[in-house]
Image: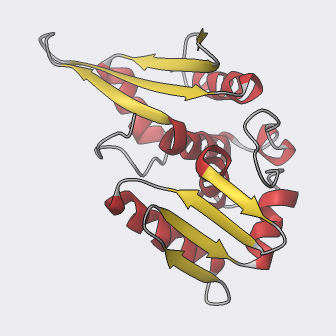
């Protein structure tokens, strides 16, 4: 399994929507620069056979094989999926590089960076917040294997994990193939 495919599965799990009848995957993506990056990655993964469209706030992938892979291999349910998502078995038993890529996709969908510039030197914190406890526990587990995450906490109806400190945030950016770092957050 390719790390880029695992990344895309994480991103779609967080911000995507599958329609099997239309063999279509829509991924909500902001900002435009990030959408272009994901458009290029989708083109690489799907190849010439699929139809990739850059819509106003989403990338649309129309390809039967790709949609079936997301559903069958990565166990992404069609329609509303937040509460019923499970960590795919292929990801649970995958090498660390693949797990890191999957978590990076989740970060780009549901994570953001905060910088406290009042402190000298400034202090960074990365945060993941998801509505699914099992997914958050898996994210925490992968972060702990990489000596990054410490604990999960709830914030309203969401479960969150923080990576605190400049060194840990920099390590996350080096070891996880995120694509949205340095871009303004929608959170």
Image height of 174 relative to 125, above or below: below
The N terminus - image quarter: bottom right
- For residue 152, above or below residue 181: above
Q: How is the image coloured?
A: secondary structure
Closer to us: 139 or 114? 114
The answer to which of 29 and 148 lies nearer the viewer is 29
> Percent from the top left, x then y, of residue 94?
76, 44
Q: Position of residue 145 (x, y in %)?
A: 63, 24
Left or right: 39, with 99 as reference point: left
Image position of 25 with respect to 184: above or below: below
Most extreme residue toward the bottom, as rendered?
Answer: 48
Residue 85 in the image: x percent, y percent?
79, 38
Q: Residue sitting at 63 percent across and 73 percent down?
A: 61
The residue drawn where x is 77% and y is 68% is 67
Q: Quadrant of residue 106?
A: top right
Question: In this image, 33 relative to 96: left or right?
Answer: left
Q: Nearer the viewer, residue 176 or 118?
A: 118
Q: Residue at x 34, y 61 (%)?
A: 32
Question: Toward which corner of the image does residue 82 lie, by quadrant?
Answer: top right
Q: Residue at x 70, y 21 (%)?
A: 137
Q: Quadrant of the C terminus?
A: top left
Side (left or right) of 135 relative to 118: right
Q: Quadrant of residue 86?
A: top right
Image mark count: 0
């Amino acid at each position: 399994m390719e790390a880029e495919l695992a990344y895309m599965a994480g991103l779609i799990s967080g911000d995507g929507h599958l329609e099997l009848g239309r063999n279509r995957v829509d991924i909500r993506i902001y900002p435009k620069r990030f959408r272009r990056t994901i458009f290029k990655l989708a083109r690489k993964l799907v190849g010439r056979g699929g139809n990739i469209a850059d819509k106003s706030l989403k990338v649309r992938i129309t390809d039967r094989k790709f949609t079936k892979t997301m559903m069958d291999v990565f166990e992404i349910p069609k329609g509303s999926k937040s509460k019923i998502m499970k960590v795919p078995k292929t990801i649970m038993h995958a090498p660390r590089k693949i797990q890191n890529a999957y978590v990076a996709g989740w970060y780009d969908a549901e994570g953001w960076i905060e910088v406290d510039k009042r402190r000298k030197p400034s202090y960074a914190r990365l945060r993941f917040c998801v509505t699914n406890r099992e997914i958050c526990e898996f994210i925490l587990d992968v972060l702990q294997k990489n000596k990054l995450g410490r604990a999960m906490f709830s914030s309203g109806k969401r479960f969150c994990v923080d990576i605190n400190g400049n060194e840990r945030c920099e390590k996350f950016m080096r070891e996880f193939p995120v694509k949205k770092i340095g871009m303004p957050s929608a959170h």
